[in-house]
Image: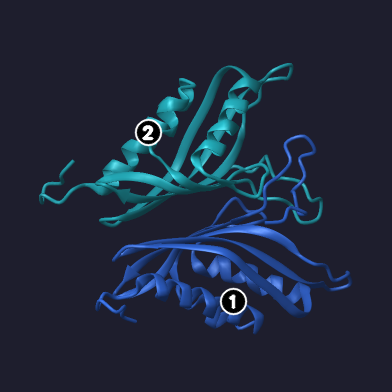
Chain colours: A blue, B cyan
Amino acid sequence: METATGKIDEEGMIRRLTEEWVDALRARDLDRMMKNYSPDVTVFDISPPLQYVGAEAYRRKWEQMFKSIEGPIGYEVREMTVTAGDEVAFCHCLNRISGKMKGGKGNDGAWIRVTVCFRKVDGRWMVTHEHASVPFDGKSGKASLDLKP
Amino acid sequence: METATGKIDEEGMIRRLTEEWVDALRARDLDRMMKNYSPDVTVFDISPPLQYVGAEAYRRKWEQMFKSIEGPIGYEVREMTVTAGDEVAFCHCLNRISGKMKGGKGNDGAWIRVTVCFRKVDGRWMVTHEHASVPFDGKSGKASLDLKP
């Protein structure tokens, strides 16, 4: 993608990758979700462990996740900001994931904070780091799942 | 800083900024801590709110934090990885913050995950986004404060 000035629209490419990832998630298509992750990605995820090292480990988390959610998975992205150089980029946004856990009830979902960091490898943007979280209340020690953007 | 090949060592600069920030935190020197934050930084922090928008709001959080911790503040950084282009950079690490809350007991501290994202503005690396968190256990809803790297 090129802008009117002929410069490659790196920001637009990052946005498109993110849209494709969300489409793949809704379709429960793991291969498509994982195709832009670097094999050595480090992921700080919403729930333990402290970190996943490597795309394979992170992929297994999603496999488990898909087994435990029945029916459609909702995923909404808000307030996305993209910063892209020629070789390094990052984006952050507030996302809401919702669905019905097996044997449980459906819910409106919780808002999570997501940061995705990219490096260009052989001309292709790859995710080398991702960080998703919910803040927790210091007094109760509980995750704050009812915050809204 | 230049490398042997004459290229500016952007990665080394990011590492140095981080070391300076940790020094400033231990010294409770807010001005020094905040000097490399962009005025429009977006911070996803360990505890609510969902996000801080702007360096001023984030600075006030640290002011409160310093009031509630008495005595020395411990801060350890591990497994830091830096990815730096010419204009955009990010780093991530596992950090342990410890201290004695006023009227409370000292503790060994919890390991947190930290991602810091930078953009070069007028030749200077500035933090435009930061994300710090602890994962939470989906069953208990509680933050997992006892995980170790």
- Percent across and percent down for residue B43 are 54, 46
Measured in 3D between alpha carbons, the distance from the residue under mark 1 to the one under mark 2, in whole angstroms, is 36 Å
- At x 57% / y 26%, what residue is drawn? B63
The quarter of the picture where residue B97 lies is top right
Q: Judge whether B148 appears above or below A100 on screen.
A: above
Which residue in the protein does label 2 denote?
B19
Residue B118 is tagged as none
Which residue in the protein does label 1 denote?
A22
Q: Is residue A143 left or right of residue B31?
A: right
Q: Quadrant of the C terminus of chain B?
A: top right
Q: Judge whether A64 appears above or below B119 on screen.
A: below
- Is A63 or A15 nearer to us in this picture? A15
Residue at the outermost front position: A4
Structural crowding at the residue carrying mark 2, measured as other residues with C-alpha within 10 Å and reported as few (<14), some (14–19) or many (≥20): few
Q: Quadrant of the N terminus of chain B?
A: top left
Structural crowding at the residue carrying mark 1, measured as other residues with C-alpha within 10 Å and reported as few (<14), some (14–19) or many (≥20): some
The quarter of the picture where residue A93 lies is bottom right
- Percent across and percent down for residue A54 are 49, 64
Is residue B149 visible in the rendered structure shown here?
A: no
